[in-house]
Amino acid sequence: MLGGLAFVFAWRFIPHQGQYCIGASGAVMTVLVLCAIHYPTRIIYLFFFIPVPIWFFIIFEIGQDAFGFLTGHAGGTAVTVHLAGAGFAFLYYNRHWRLMTVWNMVRGWQRQLFRPKLRIYHEEPRQTVSVASPPASGDVDEQLEAKLDAVLEKVARHGKQSLTDSENQILQRASEIYKRRRT
């Protein structure tokens, strides 16, 4: 995309540029320059048998494109696209740009664009838990009753799986006392 913008800019303001921009040569140049920056000693084979270090190949290609741009003898090649790709790769490496941060910003913008504009808050009604009245006799002491009330309220709010072992023991003890009272 950046190469296409560079081509349109050069075509508009520099009269000796070509008329067409076809292909992904700017993106290919970007990848080649980044590869040369990261692996400068890597050997590539021109025409399948001439070994050349990648840095030398890239310098030659950029020099050839710059010469074509400056003299106006590009031979129908959109050299501005190649140079823009090489420039982007150089800046990408030196400025430590990361395209994933741009992608995350775009995704965040999309989420904000498509989320509901207004959220209405509804308070959930409190659920009341009815506890059977304790037996009339004084077997169930008041401390156990208070602990049992707290445990039952926790069960009503968070479910039985949220209870600790000591709270489960309180439920068991109260259950046994109430069972004995029924019989």
Image: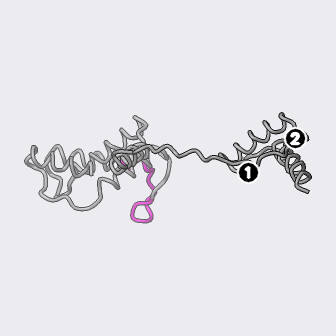
Sooner in the amino-acid sequence: mark 1 or mark 2:
2
Q: Nearer the viewer, residue 171 or 111?
A: 171
Left or right of 129, for residue 92: left
Local crowd size for mark 1, using a 10 Å CA cut-off: few (<14), some (14–19), many (≥20) = some
Residue at left offset 18%, top offset 46%? 69
Image quadrant where residue 126 sits = top right
Left or right of 180, for residue 20: left
Q: Pinpoint residue 140: horizontal percent, then vertical percent.
A: 87, 41
Number of dots carrying numbers: 2
Q: Pinpoint residue 116: horizontal percent, then vertical percent.
A: 36, 49
Q: Pinpoint residue 92: horizontal percent, then vertical percent.
A: 38, 41
Local crowd size for mark 2, using a 10 Å CA cut-off: few (<14), some (14–19), many (≥20) = some
State the residue position of label 2.
Answer: 140
Residue found farthest to the bottom: 48
The amino acid on which the numbered mark 1 sits, given as a three-letter code, is Lys
Left or right of 180, for residue 75: left
- The quarter of the image holding the C terminus is bottom right
* Distance between the alpha carbons at the discs numbered 1 and 2: 22 Å
Mark on residue 128? none
The amino acid on which the numbered mark 2 sits, given as a three-letter code, is Val
> Do the residues under discs 1 and 2 have CB atoms within 8 angstroms?
no
Callout 2: SS: loop
Residue at left offset 74%, top offset 51%? 161
State the residue position of label 1.
Answer: 160
- State which mark lies toward you, 1 or 2: 2
Q: Is residue 105 magenta?
A: no
Callout 1: SS: helix
Q: Nearer the viewer, residue 156 or 41?
A: 156
Query: In this picture, which residue range is highlighted in magenta?
Result: 45-59
